[in-house]
Image: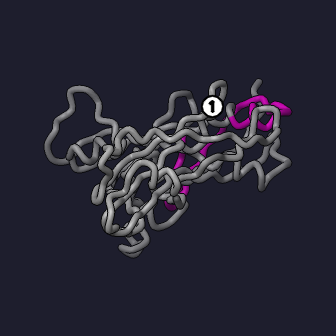
Amino acid sequence: PEWYDDAGCFGLGVPNMDEPLTADLLRALLPEAIIAALDDGQSVTLPLTWDLTIIPAEGIQEGRYTLNAILPEGYVLSDDAPALTVLLETGGGEVYAPTKKYVNNWEYVHYGNEKVSEKDYSYFVDIYIRIPPEKTELIKRLEGCLPRQISGIGYYSQVLIDAGFILPEGSPTLGEVEGYVNIKWNIEEVLSKNPGFSYGGTYTFDAKPVSNPGYELCINSKNKDLPENANDTSEIGGILNLTVTVHELP
């Protein structure tokens, strides 16, 4: 399987076969183990058990299937780890491509008193935190300070909802609808590039929309001067940007 960043999952294409693809044949195409980083910083190799109950005994020749792996007892994925999921496409052998849905007129959603300002499609905010010595704890605190969702407008369809667009209860189910999209920031990447993260510093983060497996929510830029082939989050980075100035919590 190959990782597809835009879909947030692994994809596996299997070409047309003379014989049906059985669970035993499929198991040989899937990873047997992963190398995992534990909370204490050590690495360990963990065997994977694939749930292939979705594959009938007689095998399959065409279709799309979601396959999930199970970790050994006593181990769980961290919140920021990618799901152990593979999207299997059989019959054509083509690389998996997610179904895209688009969201416009977006705004950051805040849960605290932080106010986001905007200038020339760049966004700015002041945050107040205590910087802990442990990187993992700093990541958690930044996750608590940065917006976790955007609001936006999409054109209603069940596919939009399946993709991960959150529709408030009682909303209309026709035409343009207002809702929410969860987002994930590149916090670890920014901290790795800025090991001296400190009070008074200014740091720019980039977020991606969180989509369900098999789909890709694409957030359109507000900049109407961008070309059509480079104006949403599936095509360029930096649309969901946020420059943060860090202050010490009083």
Taking depth in this image into account, of 235 and 200 the one nearest to the observer is: 235
**Residue wearing tag 1:** 72
Q: Badge 1, how many Cα within 10 Å: few under 14, some, many 20+?
A: few
| Percent coordinates x, y for residue 220 in the rendering | 38, 59
Taking depth in this image into account, of 171 and 120 the one nearest to the observer is: 171
Taking depth in this image into account, of 211 and 57 the one nearest to the observer is: 57
| Percent coordinates x, y for residue 124 in the rendering | 59, 48
Taking depth in this image into account, of 232 and 217 the one nearest to the observer is: 217
Indicate how the structure is coloured in the image. one colour
| Percent coordinates x, y for residue 229 in the rendering | 39, 74
Q: Is residue 24 above or below residue 172?
A: below
Task: Answer with the quarter of the image where residue 56 lies.
Answer: top left
Q: Secondary structure at mark 1?
A: loop
| Percent coordinates x, y for residue 108 in the rendering | 47, 42
User: In percent of the image, x 45 and y 53: which residue is there?
Assistant: 26
The answer to whether 100 appears left or right of 138 in the picture is left
Which image quarter is the C terminus in? top right
Q: Amino acid at mark 1?
A: Pro
Q: Is residue 132 above or below residue 217?
A: above
Residue 101 appearing in the image = no
Q: Is residue 153 above or below residue 135?
A: below
Q: Is residue 29 above or below residue 166?
A: below
Residue 224 appearing in the image = yes
User: In percent of the image, x 63 and y 51: which residue is there?
Assistant: 205
User: In percent of the image, x 15 and y 47: which residue is there?
Assistant: 175
| Count of numbered marks | 1
Residue 218: say if magenta. no
User: In percent of the image, x 25 and y 47: which residue is there?
Assistant: 159
Task: Answer with the quarter of the image where residue 164 lies.
Answer: top left
Query: What span is colored magenta in the figure?
Result: 116-139
